[in-house]
Image: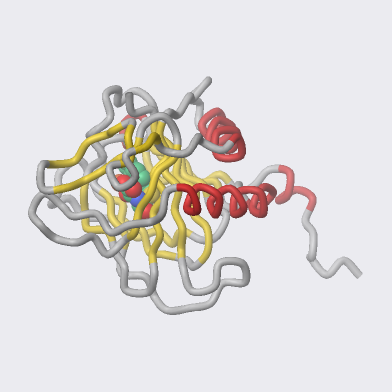
Amino acid sequence: MNLELFDATEAAEPAALPLADGALLLRGFALAAQYQLLADVRGVIAAAPLRHLITPGGLRMSVATTNCGALGWVSDRRGYRYDAIDPERNLPWPPMPASFRALARQAAARAGFDAFAPDACLVNRYLPGAKLSLHQDRDEHDFSAPIVSISLGLPAVFLFGGLRRADKALRVALRHGDVVVWGGASRLRFHGVLPLADGQHGLLGGERVNLTLRAAG
Ligand code: MD3
Ligand code: FE
């Protein structure tokens, strides 16, 4: 009779999987808010269009990005930085939607980071073949705050390395609705995303969107 369409335990408390010291994967944590999140992602992209940034080395990133919040992460020939102004539009970034802020705060609290107050949200859009090479996130001022990531759409294989680039990386599938809190001893770990595989997602079609919320300023 119960065809497992609804599991009350899972719905109330999605699985929390510790990946490493300071890194907590909350499977499906964003599902309850998925429609609001998606509508808000579309609003942000409509205001500040996705673009392929150029790395300081002159390469065009395969991932397309935009931002919302007081600060946005940008890259060009001069380097990586956070900027209050979108250089494409010469305007501030669109405000951070309440749905992003609330979900990130709840997820961070689950991982033991109280009162997480992100001032930047990087929106990454992956089409099949798009990838993110192994890197550290170290352009933020305060590494004591975590980064919260929200995955929507097609699944990706995430590479979770160590504190040195050469350290062996764990592979983790990140799926629609997954939220990960990266803080503490994991905050400066190298990480990346393997090239996105083709597929179709019911809500997002042939793409993946990842939101990373940061206390950058
Ligand atoms: C682990 N984004 O935007 S989110 C990035 O799926 C970025 O778009 C990936 O890496 C994406 O910088 C991965 C997961 C993530 C984000 C930040 C981290 C993992 C992290 C910071 C430290 C350690
Ligand atoms: Fe990163």
Q: Quadrant of residue 138?
A: top left
Q: Residue furthest left?
A: 57
Q: Residue furthest right?
A: 1
The residue under the point 55% across, 50% down is 43
Image spot of residue 198 (x, y percent): 42, 79
The residue under the point 34% across, 45% down is 89
* Quadrant placement of the N terminus: bottom right
- Foreground pick, 24 / 77: 77
The residue under the point 73% across, 43% down is 12
In the displayed structure image, the side of residue 182 where residue 45 appears, left or right: right
The residue under the point 79% across, 59% down is 6
Image spot of residue 56 (x, y percent): 11, 49
Q: With respect to residue 97, does 27 lie above or below? A: below
Image spot of residue 159 (x, y percent): 31, 57
Q: With respect to residue 194, does 34 lie above or below? A: above
Q: Quadrant of residue 102?
A: top right
In the displayed structure image, the side of residue 55 where residue 211 appears, left or right: right
Q: Quadrant of residue 121?
A: top left
- Foreground pick, 35 / 12: 35
Query: Residue 49, can we see it?
Result: yes
Q: With respect to residue 86, does 210 lie above or below? A: below
Q: Residue furthest front?
A: 90
Query: Residue 22, can we see it?
Result: no
The figure's colour scheme reads secondary structure
Image spot of residue 128 (x, y percent): 37, 74
- Foreground pick, 18 / 106: 106
- Foreground pick, 156 / 48: 48
